[in-house]
């Protein structure tokens, strides 16, 4: 074999260093994605018959399925309900605990607690809040003389109840990112604008918020991914019911795959989710990035 | 100009829990003055400036701007601008937006903003950079943006907190002259914080020297240099620093500790210190008149040479113009009596005593100079 040039050798080293990550990603992300895409284009054969290629027929079937549209609509409502609220709340909490405050460390910890609770545990806690007879909320309402609400059993209330719990769980997590970003803003900027008599409100919109844009973008992407990743608390709280009122896309995938054993439909929905997420992420990174200042 | 830009501090104190950063200081800055707050780090000069700006609240005492008591007013209502050490530019805004930031806050109409921006950008030579972001500018240009932001507000008072300390040495001396020129052109009242005595001497109309939260001396650069109020002031101004030698009682007067042969002041000066600037000492051949000494080493700096000389175990520095190689040679030191300063045991200046003059007749044989640079 010919003597390798040092440049070649460096390229080989580089490739070898990338190999472990590439293997892991390929095995657990890219290969499953590809098989999922392939699965969504075939109908499984019965009794050992080979699978039949059906093209986009599975997608046609899926788009004709009213339950899918209901679940997709639920998920959209869920996203619109949780993302802006939890981000606004996170930013508010971060601004609050970033200021001069007695017992600041304690408040920060309190805000962050929901995040460190496992989802299943958190959902169980909220089960007690929402329970129709003995639940905390209905007890409080009863004490004020109102009749209770069936928070998770009433189809018109259930999705809202799930949204409230998600906001509670996520806001503290996002707050940490905002808090870190706020601490990275030089205090002189506030002083310089104070000297010009800039109001707090104006300082927030002209300085703080633009400087937090990279964080907001990051949090937004995370929140979006989280919004289509909900399985665990639906599992505890509602199992997607009543009458699919709280069923969300990933839980629907789970149901199709493991309750109805319809792997093809599950694969088809998964591909649709992936495509929608990819489009949204691309739009965000291309449009918002141009208007975002990175330090 | 009216009295609007007069700044008056009356017994102002700043305490944090147990520590007192600024201890009961008072001074009065008249309009158009360029005042330097000078001192080592931790002396309270920045805190004083921040109290005038309103960024820190005074624990005690009052601050007046013009005739108004501004002690409890928020910074924006005090009618002053400030240049920060870090420049405090908004990284996401263009140079133009940075400069007009305050005008927008004060709701100055857009056309007037543009007009003032153009004028100020011209003044600080930034016209070609208005659309850039601060990260695309050099250190000196950022400094100019910070200055422009202070100037455009048209406040008669500008506070500067070590504005040049992030610049390299050459740029610093250019900016020193620019700031000074800008100040006199716009007739601003400037309070300028620095720990650099060169900035203080070259820019200030008046220098307030601080130590441990107190004012040590308040005077013109000339006064600080020629009549330092304390041993601390003497050692802080001038480079290399003034030589300070402990005095003890000798037979015929106070002598430098360890060097009994030559009295340098009257007996009452014993227990204090004698201060002589390196540039005021003359180095003579041995066994002429003056204090006998030994040259230990010399540093050649180009325009002049600093000789390190020991007298009775104390090292002092002597500055001579030109190049000299004197290391290892004995010599005699002398100085004019008005160039020597006496400080008491507490480090305060004594004007009641005068240092001795060295008698030129003591050793009568005038000799041609053998070593050093002799200016007689």
Image (cartoon, rainbow, N blue to C red):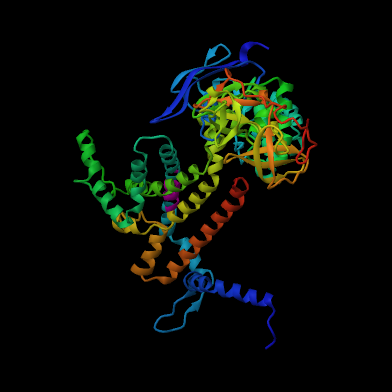
Q: Main secondary structure of the magenta part?
A: helix
Residue at (62, 36) in percent of width and height: B87
Q: Nearer the viewer, residue B224 or A152?
A: B224
Furthest-right residue in view? B368
From this view, report whether residue A27 is shown above or below residue A122: below
Residues in magenta, as a range: A75-84
Residue A209, given in percent of the width and then of the height, sits at 53, 39
Q: Nearer the viewer, residue B321 or B132?
A: B321
Residue A161, given in percent of the width and then of the height, sits at 33, 47
From this view, report whether residue B334 is shown above or below residue A22: above
Residue at (50, 53) in percent of width and height: A221
Residue B107, given in percent of the width and then of the height, sits at 61, 24
Residue A58, given in percent of the width and then of the height, sits at 48, 68
Furthest-front residue in view? B364
Q: Is residue A125 magenta?
A: no
Location of residue B160 by image quarter: top right
Task: Specify the quadrant that holds the N terminus of chain A.
Answer: bottom right
Q: Is residue A82 magenta?
A: yes
């Amino acid at each position: 074999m010919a003597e390798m040039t040092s440049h070649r050798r460096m390229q080989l080293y580089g490739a070898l260093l990338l190999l472990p990550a590439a293997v892991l990603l390929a095995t657990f992300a890219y290969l499953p994605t590809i098989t999922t895409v392939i699965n969504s284009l075939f109908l499984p054969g019965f009794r050992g018959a080979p699978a039949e290629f059906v093209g986009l027929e599975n997608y046609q079937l899926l788009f004709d399925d009213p339950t899918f549209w209901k679940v997709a609509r639920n998920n959209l409502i869920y996203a619109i309900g949780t993302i802006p609220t939890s981000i606004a709340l996170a930013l508010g909490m971060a601004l609050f605990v970033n200021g001069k405050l007695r017992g600041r460390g304690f408040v920060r910890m309190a805000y962050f607690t929901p995040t460190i609770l496992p989802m299943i545990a958190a959902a169980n806690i909220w089960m007690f809040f929402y329970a129709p007879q003995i639940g905390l909320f209905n007890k409080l309402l009863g004490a004020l003389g109102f009749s209770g609400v069936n928070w998770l059993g009433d189809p018109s209330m259930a999705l809202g109840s799930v949204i409230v719990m998600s906001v509670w769980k996520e806001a503290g997590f996002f707050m940490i990112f905002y808090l870190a970003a706020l601490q990275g803003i030089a205090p002189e900027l506030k002083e310089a604008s104070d000297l010009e008599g800039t109001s707090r409100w104006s300082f927030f919109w002209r300085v703080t918020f633009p400087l937090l844009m990279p964080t907001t973008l990051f949090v937004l992407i995370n929140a979006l991914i989280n919004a289509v990743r909900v399985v665990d608390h639906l599992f505890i709280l509602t199992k997607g019911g009543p009458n699919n009122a709280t069923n969300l896309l990933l839980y629907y995938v789970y149901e199709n795959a493991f309750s109805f054993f319809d792997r093809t439909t599950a694969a088809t929905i998964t591909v649709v989710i992936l495509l929608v997420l990819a489009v949204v992420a691309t739009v965000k990174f291309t449009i918002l990035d141009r208007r975002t200042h990175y330090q | 100009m009216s009295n609007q830009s007069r700044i008056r501090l009356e017994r102002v104190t700043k305490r944090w829990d147990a520590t007192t950063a600024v201890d009961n200081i008072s001074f009065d800055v008249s309009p158009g003055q360029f005042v330097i707050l000078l001192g080592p780090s931790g002396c309270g000069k920045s805190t004083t400036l921040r109290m005038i700006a309103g960024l820190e609240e005074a624990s005690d005492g009052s601050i007046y701007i013009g005739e108004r008591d501004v002690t409890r007013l928020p910074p924006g209502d005090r009618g002053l601008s400030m240049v920060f050490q870090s420049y405090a530019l908004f990284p996401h805004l263009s140079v133009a937006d940075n400069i007009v930031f305050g005008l927008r806050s004060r709701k100055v109409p857009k056309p007037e903003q543009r007009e003032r921006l153009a004028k100020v950008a011209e003044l600080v030579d930034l016209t070609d950079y208005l659309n850039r972001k601060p990260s695309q500018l050099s250190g000196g240009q950022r400094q100019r943006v910070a200055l422009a932001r202070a100037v455009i507000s048209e406040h008669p008072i500008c506070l500067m907190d070590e504005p040049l300390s992030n610049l390299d040495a050459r740029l610093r001396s250019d900016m020193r002259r620019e700031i000074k020129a800008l100040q006199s052109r716009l007739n601003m009242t400037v309070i300028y914080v620095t720990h650099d005595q060169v900035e203080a001497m070259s820019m200030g109309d008046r220098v307030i020297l601080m130590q441990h939260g107190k004012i040590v001396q308040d005077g013109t650069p000339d006064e600080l240099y020629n009549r330092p109020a304390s041993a601390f002031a003497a050692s802080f101004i001038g480079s290399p620093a003034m030589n300070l030698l402990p005095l003890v009682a000798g037979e015929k007067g106070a002598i430098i500790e360890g060097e009994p042969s030559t009295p340098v002041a009257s007996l009452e000066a014993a227990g204090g210190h004698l201060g002589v600037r390196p540039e005021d000492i003359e180095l003579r051949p041995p066994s002429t008149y003056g204090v006998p000494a030994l040259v230990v080493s010399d540093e050649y700096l180009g325009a002049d040479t600093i000789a390190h000389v020991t007298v009775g175990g104390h090292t002092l520095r002597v500055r001579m113009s030109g190049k000299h190689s004197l290391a290892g040679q004995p010599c005699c030191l002398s100085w004019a009596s008005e160039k020597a300063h006496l400080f008491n045991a507490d480090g305060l200046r004594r004007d009641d005593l005068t240092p001795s003059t060295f008698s030129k007749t003591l050793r009568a044989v005038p000799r041609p100079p053998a070593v050093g640079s002799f200016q007689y």
